C-alpha cells in the first residue's frame, strides 16, 4: 500500500486526545480537509462497533478537517455518553484526500455489587439508595469521589466529626467489565460540644446568647430534642443569629471579632466566641418619603415604632417589608394588597447620631396594577367552572396579594387538588401595569370506596359504600365521560348499602355546591331507609313479622354570605323521618305498634376560615351556631297530653336543640399546629305535660363515631371513656366539651397524609340545665395517629387515658383505645 | 407462557415474543415485554424498531399521551429513519387525540398545535397536510371555546368587570375567532348591567363605555340577530345617562 506523506505523518499516529490537545495541535499543524474514508473502533468490550460509530456523529464520505471541529465534537460526544473513561483518535491511513480514523475507547466499568461495612445492614441499604449507587451505574471517578464525600458528610452532620470513609473497587470476574465496590465507614466517636464561651459581652448575658444559637448547643444532661453537635454550616448560621439578636436589642454595631474551635483531650469541643457589642441605639426621627396613596399618619399606624424606642433593625424590616407570613401587617403588604404590585418600600438609615438613628421609609408607589389574565393549569379532571368560581383574583380587578392567598385556600378546601401544591405564578407586565396570574394545581383522588364483609350476630354482614366527591351528574348518561366515572363538576354523590339476615339499610345523598352555577348556594338531598327484623338469639331465627322500618329524607340549602365577612355560611334544611313499628319493642319507645314522625327544621350559621389544607389545617378557625326544631304540635292542639297513650304522644315528635361549636387552629411552629375546640349542645321541650323527648339525645364518650341511628341520637366524642359512657342509658340533654390537640404532620403527600397528635380534653353530659355544671368535667389525655388516603378516607387510632370515673363506678376510666374509619375530625 | 418469558426469559426470547405479541395485536403484553428488553438493546440497531413498536402499541391501546411521547422520542432519536414522517405525524395526532374536553387543562391541546405546526412546516408536501390543517383549526376552536366559556361564566355569576376584561382577552388572543359575535354581544350585556347597577359616582363613565361597546358590536355585526335587542338596551342606557347628567347639573 502506497503511503503519501503530507503534512500529516501517517502510521506515526496523530493523537488527538481531547479538545484541548487538538487545539494545541491546531496551532502547530495546518489543518487540511479530507474525505472520511472509514472509521474503526478499538477497545470494545460490551458495545457494538456500530453503536459507537453512531455516537461519534461522523459519517463515512463526509468532509472532515484534520485536526478540526468535527473531530473534537465527536470526542466530546463520546465522553458525554458517560460510557467511556478514555477516548483516543488516530489517523491510521491517508489515501490522497481520503482519511481513515481509528477510535480507541476504554469502556467504563459498570457497578455490580456494593457492600458497605461499618454500619448496620438497614442503614447500609439506606445509604446506598441515598447515594444512588445502583447496580449498573457507570463507575466514573466522579462517582467515587462524590459517594465518598456524601458518606462522610452524612455522618459529620450527625456529629461524627472524625468519620473516615474508604472506598475501594475491585474487578468482578463473573461479569463483563463490571466492578464491585467496597465502602468502609468508620464513624468514630460522636464529638460533643463541652462548652460555648463568650468574651466581650457585657450587656447581654452568655446564657441568653447561647439560647439564641438554635443549632449549636452545649452538652447538657437531659437534652433530648437537639443533640449537642458541631456542624460548621449551622454554626456559621448561629453566629449570624447572634448578630441579629444584638441588633434586635439596639446594638446595631455588634460584630463577631473572632471564633475558635478547640478539641479537648476527651475528644469534645470548646467553642470560643469573641464579640464586640458596641453602643445601644434608639430610634431617632422616622420620616416617610414618596407616599401619596396613604398619609404619614396611616403609615405610622402600621409601623408602630416611635421615636425613642430601642433600635431594632429586625422589627423595622418586618414592619416595612413583611415577616414572611401571609397575615403580616406591614407597609409593603398594605401596598401589595391594594393593587400596588410594582411598589417598593425600603427602610433607610439616614443619620447615625450619638445614641439614636434617624430612619427614612422610602416608598416608590408606582401605579396600581390590574389583573389581566387568570388561568388554571393541571386540572385534568375538574372542569374549569368549578375552579374558576373559587378564584378571588379576577380579570380587571386590582392586584392583591391577600386575594391570591385566599384563592390558594379556597382551591385547597375543594378537596379535589393537593392542597399543599397549589402554586400561583405571576407574570407582571410593567409597561401597561397589568399582571397575569396562573394557578398550577395537581389533581388528587377524591372518591372513596367501602367494601366490607363480616360475620356478626350469627349472620353475614355485607357493606358496599361508594362516595364520589367530584361527581358530574350531567354526564351520568354520557358514555364518553366515564373515565372511569363521570367526574369534574364538584358534586358529591354517595351510596351505601348494608345487609345482613335481620336488617338492611340503604342510603343515598347528593350535594351540588353551586346550584344553578350562579351563586355559591349549595343544595343537598338525601334519603335513607332501614328495616330491622326481630332476631331471636336463642333459636337463631329471624321473625319477619316483627320489625321496625325507618324511612327518612332531608333536603337542604346552604348559602355563602358576604356579611359579616365572606367566610360565613348560612345553611338550612328540613329533615323527615318515619318510624314504623310492628310488634317490635325497643327501649326508646314505650309502645311496640304504631308510627312516629320526626319532622325538623335545621338552621346553622357558621364561619370557616381554616386552611389551607382541609386535611391538615394550619391556621384559621371554624365556628357554628345551630338550631334544630320541630313544630310544637302539643301547644297547637287541645289534646291533654298527660293522659294520652305513648303511641299518641309520640306520633309527632317535638323538641328543639341548640348547639355551638368553635375550633381554632394555631400554628406553634412551621409544622406543629394547636387545635382548640369547644362544643356545647342543649335539647329542650315545649310542653311540660309532654316533657323530654326520648329521641335526639346526646351520648358523650368514646370515639364519637355514629353507627347506631335508630333514635336520632348524637354521639359526642370524648376520648378516654367508653362509647356513651358519660351519659346515662337514655342519653343526656345537655353536654359540653373542650379539647386541646397538638398535631404534627409526618407526611402530607396527596397519596397519604399522616399526622401524629397529642391531646387533652374534658367534657360531660347532664340530664338537664338544673344539673348543668360546666366545671364538673371528665378529663382525659392521650396520643394518636391519623392517616388520610384518598381512596379510603380517614383511618385513625387514639390511645387515651380517662382520669375520672364514669357515673356509677368509683374507679377511673383508665386507658382506652379508639379507632376511626372514614370519618373526619 | 407469557408470564414465564416476561419474568424469567432470556432477553432474546423476550424480544422475540414481544414482536410476536405486537404482530398479533396483543399490545399491552407487548409493551410490558418491550419495556423489559429496552435496557439491553440500548444503542443497538434493533432499538429503532423497538421504539417504533412501543409507540405504535401505546397508540393502538389508546394511551395517546404516552404514544405522543414515544413517537416524539423516536423522531428525535432516529432522524434518518424511513418512518420519520409517519412518526412525526403520529406524535402530533396522538397529542390531538389526547386533547381533552375544553373545560380541562389544555396542555395536550397546545402540544398538539405545536406538533402539527412543526409537521406542516417540515413536510409541506405530505399527503397528511389536509388532515393536519383540519386538526389545527379544530384545536384552536377548542381553545377559543375555553376562553369564551370562562368569560361567560364571569357574566353568569354577575361579575361584570371580570367578564368584560375576559372577553377582551379572548378577542385579543384569538384574532378572527368564530366567537367574536357572541363575545362582543355578551360583553355589551355585561357592560350594560354594570352600568345600570353602578353606584352613582361611576355610572356616567360606565354607561358611556357600554354605549361604546354597542357601537363596536353594531359596526362589526350589522346583520346580527342580537342587534335589535342591543338597540333596545341602548335606549334604556341613554335614558339612564340623561337622568344621571341631569342630576349632576342639578347638584
Image: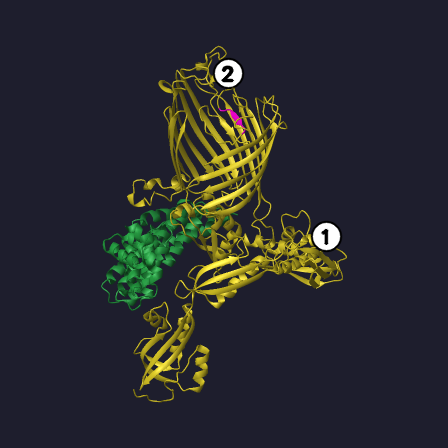
Left or right: A156 with respect to A10? right
Q: Quadrant of residue A314?
A: bottom right
Within-10-Å neighbours for mark 2: few <14, some 14–19, many 20+: some
Q: Which residue is mark 1?
A: A207
Q: Which residues are magenta?
A: A696-701
Q: Give the distance between the C-alpha atoms of the residues marked 1 and 2, in whole angstroms.
A: 70 Å
Q: How is the image coloured?
A: by chain
Residue A260 percent across, percent down from the top left:
69, 63
Of labels 1 and 2, earlier in sequence is 1
What chain is the yellow one?
A
Which quarter of the figure is the N terminus of chain A placed in? bottom left
Q: Which residue is mark 2?
A: A690
Answer whether residue B8 is magenta in the image.
no
| Direction top: furthest residue | A643
Q: Quadrant of residue A258?
A: bottom right
Left or right: A517 with respect to B131? right
Amino acid at each position: 500500500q502506497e503511503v503519501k506523506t503530507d503534512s500529516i505523518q501517517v502510521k506515526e499516529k496523530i493523537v488527538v486526545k481531547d479538545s484541548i490537545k487538538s487545539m494545541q495541535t491546531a496551532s502547530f499543524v495546518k489543518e487540511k480537509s479530507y474525505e472520511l474514508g472509514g472509521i474503526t473502533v478499538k477497545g470494545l468490550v460490551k458495545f457494538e462497533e456500530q453503536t459507537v460509530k453512531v455516537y461519534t456523529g461522523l459519517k463515512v464520505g463526509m468532509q472532515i478537517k484534520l485536526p478540526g471541529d468535527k473531530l473534537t465534537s465527536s470526542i466530546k460526544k463520546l465522553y458525554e455518553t458517560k460510557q467511556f473513561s478514555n477516548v483516543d483518535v488516530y489517523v491510521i491511513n491517508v489515501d490522497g484526500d481520503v482519511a481513515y480514523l481509528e477510535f480507541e475507547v476504554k469502556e467504563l466499568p459498570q457497578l455490580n455489587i456494593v457492600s458497605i461495612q461499618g454500619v448496620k445492614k438497614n442503614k447500609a441499604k439506606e445509604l446506598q439508595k441515598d447515594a444512588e449507587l445502583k447496580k449498573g451505574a457507570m463507575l466514573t471517578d466522579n462517582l467515587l469521589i462524590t459517594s465518598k464525600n456524601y458518606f462522610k458528610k452524612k455522618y459529620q452532620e450527625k456529629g461524627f466529626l472524625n468519620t473516615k470513609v474508604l472506598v475501594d473497587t475491585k474487578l468482578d470476574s463473573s461479569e463483563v467489565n463490571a466492578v464491585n465496590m467496597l465502602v468502609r465507614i468508620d464513624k468514630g466517636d460522636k464529638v460533643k460540644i463541652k462548652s460555648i464561651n463568650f468574651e466581650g459581652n457585657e450587656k447581654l448575658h452568655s446564657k441568653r446568647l447561647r439560647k439564641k444559637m438554635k443549632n449549636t448547643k452545649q452538652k447538657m444532661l437531659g437534652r433530648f430534642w437537639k443533640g449537642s453537635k458541631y456542624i460548621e454550616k449551622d454554626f456559621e448560621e448561629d453566629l449570624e443569629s447572634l448578630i441579629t439578636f444584638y441588633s434586635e436589642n439596639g446594638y446595631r454595631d455588634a460584630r463577631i471579632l473572632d471564633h475558635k474551635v478547640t478539641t479537648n483531650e476527651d475528644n469534645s469541643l470548646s467553642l470560643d466566641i469573641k464579640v464586640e457589642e458596641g453602643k445601644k441605639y434608639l430610634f431617632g426621627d422616622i420620616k416617610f418619603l414618596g407616599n401619596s396613596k396613604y398619609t404619614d399618619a396611616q403609615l405610622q399606624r402600621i409601623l408602630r415604632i416611635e421615636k425613642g424606642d430601642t433600635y431594632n433593625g429586625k422589627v423595622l424590616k418586618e414592619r416595612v417589608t413583611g415577616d414572611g407570613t401571609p397575615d403580616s401587617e406591614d407597609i409593603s403588604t398594605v401596598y401589595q394588597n391594594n393593587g400596588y404590585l410594582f411598589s417598593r418600600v425600603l427602610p433607610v438609615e439616614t443619620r447615625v447620631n450619638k445614641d439614636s438613628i434617624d430612619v427614612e421609609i422610602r416608598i416608590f408607589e408606582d401605579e396600581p396594577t390590574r389583573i389581566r389574565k387568570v388561568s388554571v393549569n393541571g386540572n385534568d379532571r375538574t372542569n374549569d367552572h368549578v375552579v374558576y368560581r373559587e378564584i378571588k383574583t379576577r380579570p380587571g380587578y386590582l392586584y392583591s396579594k391577600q386575594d391570591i392567598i385566599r384563592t390558594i385556600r379556597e382551591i385547597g378546601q375543594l378537596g379535589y387538588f393537593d392542597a399543599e401544591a397549589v402554586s400561583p405564578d405571576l407574570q407582571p407586565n410593567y409597561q401597561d401595569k397589568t399582571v397575569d396570574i396562573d394557578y398550577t394545581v395537581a389533581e388528587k383522588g377524591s372518591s372513596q370506596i367501602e367494601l366490607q364483609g363480616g360475620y356478626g350476630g350469627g349472620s353475614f354482614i355485607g357493606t358496599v359504600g361508594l362516595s364520589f366527591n367530584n361527581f358530574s351528574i350531567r354526564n351520568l348518561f354520557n358514555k364518553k365521560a366515564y373515565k372511569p366515572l363521570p367526574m369534574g363538576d364538584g358534586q358529591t354523590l354517595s351510596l351505601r348499602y348494608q345487609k345482613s339476615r335481620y336488617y338492611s339499610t340503604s342510603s343515598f345523598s347528593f350535594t351540588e355546591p353551586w346550584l344553578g352555577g350562579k351563586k355559591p348556594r349549595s343544595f343537598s338531598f338525601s334519603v335513607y331507609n332501614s328495616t330491622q327484623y326481630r332476631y331471636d338469639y336463642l333459636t337463631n331465627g329471624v321473625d319477619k313479622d316483627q320489625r321496625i322500618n325507618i324511612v327518612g329524607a332531608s333536603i337542604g340549602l346552604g348559602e355563602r354570605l358576604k356579611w359579616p365577612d365572606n367566610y360565613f355560611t348560612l345553611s338550612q334544611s328540613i329533615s323527615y323521618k318515619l318510624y314504623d313499628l310492628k310488634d317490635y319493642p325497643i327501649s326508646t319507645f314505650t309502645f311496640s305498634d304504631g308510627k312516629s314522625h320526626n319532622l325538623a327544621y335545621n338552621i346553622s350559621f357558621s364561619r370557616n376560615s381554616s386552611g389551607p389544607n382541609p386535611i391538615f389545617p394550619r391556621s384559621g378557625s371554624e365556628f357554628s351556631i345551630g338550631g334544630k326544631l320541630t313544630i310544637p304540635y302539643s301547644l297547637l292542639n287541645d289534646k291533654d297530653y298527660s293522659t294520652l297513650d305513648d303511641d299518641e304522644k309520640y306520633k309527632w315528635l317535638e323538641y328543639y336543640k341548640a348547639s355551638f361549636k368553635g375550633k381554632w387552629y394555631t400554628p406553634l411552629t412551621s409544622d406543629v399546629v394547636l387545635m382548640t375546640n369547644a362544643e356545647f349542645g342543649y335539647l329542650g321541650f315545649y310542653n311540660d305535660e309532654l316533657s323530654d323527648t326520648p329521641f335526639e339525645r346526646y351520648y358523650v364518650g368514646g370515639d364519637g363515631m355514629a353507627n347506631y341511628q335508630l333514635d336520632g341520637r348524637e354521639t359526642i366524642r370524648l376520648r378516654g371513656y367508653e362509647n356513651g359512657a358519660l351519659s346515662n342509658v337514655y342519653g343526656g340533654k345537655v353536654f359540653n366539651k373542650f379539647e386541646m390537640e397538638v398535631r404534627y404532620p409526618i407526611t402530607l403527600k396527596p397519596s397519604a397524609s399522616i399526622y401524629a397528635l397529642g391531646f387533652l380534653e374534658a367534657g360531660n353530659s347532664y340530664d338537664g340545665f338544673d344539673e348543668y355544671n360546666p366545671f364538673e368535667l371528665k378529663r382525659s389525655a392521650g396520643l394518636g395517629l391519623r392517616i388520610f388516603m384518598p381512596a379510603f378516607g380517614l383511618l385513625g387510632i387514639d390511645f387515651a387515658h380517662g382520669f375520672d370515673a364514669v357515673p356509677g363506678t368509683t374507679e377511673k376510666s383508665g386507658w382506652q383505645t379508639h379507632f376511626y374509619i372514614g370519618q373526619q375530625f | 407462557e407469557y408470564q414465564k418469558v416476561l419474568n424469567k426469559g432470556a432477553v432474546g426470547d423476550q424480544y422475540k415474543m414481544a414482536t410476536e405479541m405486537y404482530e398479533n395485536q396483543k399490545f399491552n403484553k407487548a409493551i410490558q415485554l418491550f419495556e423489559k428488553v429496552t435496557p439491553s438493546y440500548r444503542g443497538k440497531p434493533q432499538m429503532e424498531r423497538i421504539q417504533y413498536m412501543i409507540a405504535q402499541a401505546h397508540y393502538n391501546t389508546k394511551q395517546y399521551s404516552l404514544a405522543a411521547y414515544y413517537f416524539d422520542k423516536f423522531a428525535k432519536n432516529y432522524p434518518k429513519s424511513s418512518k420519520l414522517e409517519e412518526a412525526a405525524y403520529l406524535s402530533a395526532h396522538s397529542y390531538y387525540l389526547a386533547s381533552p374536553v375544553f373545560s380541562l387543562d389544555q396542555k395536550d391541546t397546545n402540544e398538539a398545535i405545536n406538533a402539527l405546526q412543526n409537521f406542516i412546516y417540515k413536510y409541506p408536501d405530505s399527503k397528511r397536510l389536509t388532515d393536519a390543517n383540519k386538526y389545527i383549526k379544530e384545536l384552536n376552536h377548542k381553545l377559543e371555546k375555553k376562553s369564551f366559556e370562562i368569560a361567560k361564566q364571569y357574566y353568569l355569576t354577575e361579575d361584570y368587570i371580570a367578564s368584560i376584561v375576559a372577553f377582551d382577552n379572548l378577542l385579543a388572543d384569538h384574532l378572527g375567532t368564530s366567537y367574536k359575535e357572541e363575545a362582543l354581544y355578551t360583553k355589551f350585556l355585561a357592560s350594560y348591567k354594570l352600568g345600570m347597577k353602578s353606584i352613582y359616582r361611576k355610572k356616567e363613565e360606565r354607561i358611556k363605555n357600554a354605549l361604546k361597546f354597542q357601537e363596536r358590536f353594531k359596526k362589526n355585526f350589522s346583520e346580527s340577530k342580537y342587534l335589535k335587542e342591543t338597540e333596545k338596551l341602548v335606549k334604556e342606557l341613554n335614558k339612564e345617562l340623561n337622568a344621571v347628567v341631569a342630576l349632576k347639573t342639578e347638584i
